[in-house]
Amino acid sequence: MAAMNNLLANFYLTGVNYRKSDAGIRSKFAVHDEGYVRLLHIAARLQVKEFFILSTCNRTEIYGIAPDVESLSGLLCTETRGSHDEFIANAYVKKGREAVQHLFDVASGLDSQILGDYEIVGQLKKAVKTAKEHGMVGTFLDRLASMAFQCSKAVKTNTSLSGGTVSVSF
């Protein structure tokens, strides 16, 4: 239990999304498949033990276990068009339980431009799977992602959040 608490204390999330940044800023920090694979290979040099990146049209977020959030943001910015300073000026940071809550909100469609949008779950699963294939998802992130996916499924099954028309105008 102490080991999990230690990992939770070093679990960070930082990113840019539709709430805080316009599309021009978000596009500077998008990470495409090739860049993601490069990041997976250089993470250890920056003392990032576990991580995955969720990069969509509405957000780019890096979740991981690191000595500090700067290690994660620095890692992310090695493969983006935007500078680290620009990222910091536009990014949000969450740590520990707050970062866990954010992941659950994202996975369940509560932190989406379109409330209840479940397309994000597939994108999140792909991000975690890619990181796992490259050895960057350990027990902590694996369990956390699994619980987030279970939560997402429960929200979709037991609520009407995703019912009806799902579009920005709606």
Image: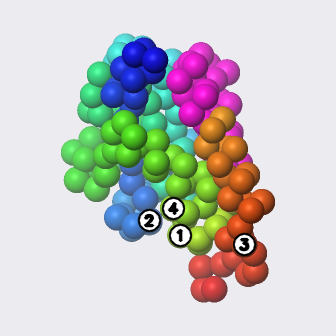
**Residue ID for mark 1:** 113
Q: Spatial distance from mark 3 to mark 4, Cα to Cα?
A: 16 Å
Q: Is residue 151 left or right of residue 144?
A: right
Residue 2 appears in the rendering: yes
Q: Nearer the viewer, residue 125 or 163?
A: 163
Dominant secondary structure (helix, strand or loop) of the stretch shown in magenta: helix
Residue 42 appears in the rendering: no
Name the residue at 63% across, 38% down: 147
Q: Amino acid at mark 3?
A: Ser
**Residues at circles 1 and 2 in contact by the CB criterion of under 8 Å:** yes
Q: Amino acid at mark 2?
A: Tyr
**Residues at circles 3 and 4 in contact by the CB criterion of under 8 Å:** no
**Residue ID for mark 4:** 111
Secondary structure of the residue carrying numbered label 1: loop
Could you say which disc has been placed on residue 160 in the image?
3
Q: Amino acid at mark 4?
A: Asp
Q: Is residue 167 left or right of residue 69?
A: right
State which tag comes first along the sequence, 3 or 4: 4
Q: Specify the segment rendered in magenta.
A: 121-145
Disc 1: CA contacts within 10 A as few (<14), some (14-19) or many (>=20): some
Could you say which disc has been placed on residue 70 in the image?
none
Residue 126: which quarter of the image? top right
Q: How is the image coloured?
A: rainbow
Would you say residue 45 sits in the magenta stretch?
A: no
State which tag comes first along the sequence, 2 or 3: 2
Secondary structure of the residue carrying numbered label 4: loop
